[in-house]
């Protein structure tokens, strides 16, 4: 969460409590981890993957709606997902080889896709939650 507070592109994070910043992030990360587990241990069971996808979608949607309510700009939400992807990428590179025989490149690819889909869902919910009010809707992603 400290990285969110210090990132110059996330001005809204300074007016957000720690609980609000962390809200839904742990659940999303857990859902990403469950998907990796299902792929490795469950053989990609479609019913398990559908359940995990429904959970990720619901969490991502609520996250976008919450960020809108907290006054974040669209570009700030995009930036948050970019940072989340970087942290997960770094964590997988460091921890996965110690814990699993799964192919690291495959795991990285899966997590990047999951983060990308969660970001799309969250941004769509953010947009649907109300008029942007000029706070960045016309801006592209900040990376």
Image (cartoon, rainbow, N blue to C red):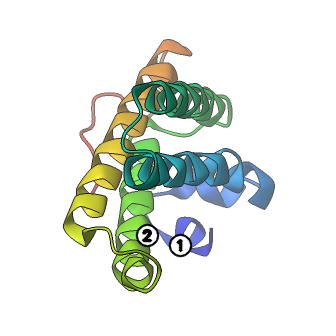
Do we see residue 134 in this rendering? no
Q: Nearer the viewer, mark 2 or mark 1?
A: 2
For disc 1, the neighbor class at 10 Å (few under 14, some 14 to 19, many from 20) is few
Q: Residue at x 51, y 55 (%)?
A: 33
Question: Which residue is disc 2 drawn over?
Answer: 87
Residue 48 is labelled as none
Q: Residue 101: where, in percent of width, then height? A: 34, 75
Q: Quadrant of the N terminus?
A: bottom right
Q: Quadrant of the C terminus?
A: bottom left
Q: CA distance from mark 2 to mark 1?
A: 10 Å
Do we see residue 55 in this rendering? yes
The tag earlier along the polypeptide, 2 or 1, is 1
Which residue is nearer to you in this view: 73 or 49? Answer: 49
Q: Residue at x 45, y 45 (%)?
A: 42
Q: Specify the quadrant of the image occupied by residue 49.
A: top left
Q: Residue 78: where, in percent of width, then height? A: 38, 44
Question: Given contact means CB atoms under 8 Å apart, are the residues at marks 2 and 1 in contact?
Answer: yes
Mark 2, secondary structure of its residue: helix
Q: Residue at x 58, y 30 (%)?
A: 55
Question: Which residue is disc 1 drawn over?
Answer: 3
């Amino acid at each position: 969460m400290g990285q969110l507070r210090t990132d110059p592109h996330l001005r809204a994070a300074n007016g957000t409590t720690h609980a609000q910043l962390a809200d839904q992030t742990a659940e999303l990360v857990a859902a990403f981890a469950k998907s990796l587990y299902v792929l490795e241990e469950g053989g990609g069971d479609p019913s398990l993957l559908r359940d995990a996808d429904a959970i990720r979608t619901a969490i991502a949607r609520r996250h976008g709606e919450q960020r809108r309510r907290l006054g974040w700009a669209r570009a700030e939400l995009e930036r948050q997902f970019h940072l989340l992807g970087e942290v997960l990428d770094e964590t997988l590179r460091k921890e996965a080889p110690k814990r699993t025989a799964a192919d690291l490149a495959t795991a990285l690819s899966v997590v990047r896709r999951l983060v990308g889909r969660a970001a799309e869902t969250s941004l769509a919910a953010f947009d649907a939650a109300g008029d942007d009010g000029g706070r960045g809707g016309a801006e592209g992603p900040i990376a």
